[in-house]
Image (spheres, grey):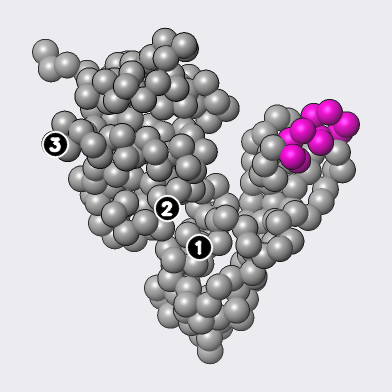
Amino acid sequence: MAAKPSVFIDGESGTTGLGIRDRLLAHPGLTLRSIAAEHRRDPAARREMMTAVDLVVLCLPDDAARDSTALADSLGGAAPKLLDASTAHRVHPDWTYGFPEMQPGQADRIARARKVANPGCYPTGAIGLIRPLIDAGLIPPDYPITINAVSSYSGGGKSMITAHESTGGPAFELYALGLEHKHVPEIQLYAGLTRRPIFCARGGTLSPGHAGLGAAAPGHPAGQAERC
């Protein structure tokens, strides 16, 4: 019997890592490998683990994900496949964007790739809305798109999570008003937009815990209203 594919989660003690760990533990076709807690920050221990597994899932902040990628790359032909949950590599040309429904053949590209960047939450919704319209010629690539997105308070990061879980926080609020949200580059690239979209995020106490989001991108079709 062939050995089960093995997976190591680099950053398994964080929120994302713990969630992925729970899902992988329930999968009978995988073997999950771990490093003892006291060695999880040891580059030598992590590098050794990387040589022993088929896939490493990076559940790390962006800079740490880049460092972990360099560690894997140093293994040359012995390097495992990488799946990065951070923002670090989503628009990097050497990485495959992990949105299988994005375009024909994307699922096969993901299956063949050694490095896959997991899509962001908001971009998954925004790209799924906008790219089909651009591909169909219903809106032009330079259309001034505004994306209205809403999530539970966890979408605003640590500061918003702390505010809501310590004091309750407002039921609904706007954030990322500097128009420089970290998801905008991948939305623009993979939606096929040539003009930077305006991304307007909202968060609040919308659902129990951290779950749930929605995105809308209203616009006028480019002379193609009868086809919508």
Q: Main secondary structure of the magenta part?
A: helix
First to last magenta residue range: 159-168
Nearer-the-camera pick, 193 or 9 = 9
Identify the amino acid type marked 2: Arg
* Callout in the foreground (3, 1): 3
Nearer-the-camera pick, 196 or 24 = 196
Give the image quarter of residue 211.
Answer: top right
Question: Vertical placement of 187 versus 80: above or below?
Answer: below
Identify the amino acid type marked 3: Gly
Which residue sits at x=40%, y=50%? Answer: 89
Q: Is residue 101 magenta?
A: no
Residue linked to disc 3: 77
Give the image quarter of residue 163.
Answer: top right
Contact (CB < 8 A) between labels 2 and 1?
A: yes
Residue 48, x across and y down, in percent: 26, 20
The secondary element bearing badge 1 is classed as helix
Residue 56, x across and y down, in percent: 33, 30
The secondary element bearing badge 2 is classed as loop
**Gap in angstroms between the C-alphas marked 2 and 1:** 9 Å
Residue linked to disc 1: 185
Identify the amino acid type marked 1: Pro
Residue linked to disc 2: 90
Which residue sits at x=39%, y=38%? Answer: 67
Residue 130, x across and y down, in percent: 51, 67
Circle 1 packing at 10 Å, graded few (<14), some (14-19), many (20+), is some
Circle 3 packing at 10 Å, graded few (<14), some (14-19), many (20+), is few
Residue 63, x across and y down, in percent: 48, 42
Sequence order check, earlier mark of 3 and 1: 3
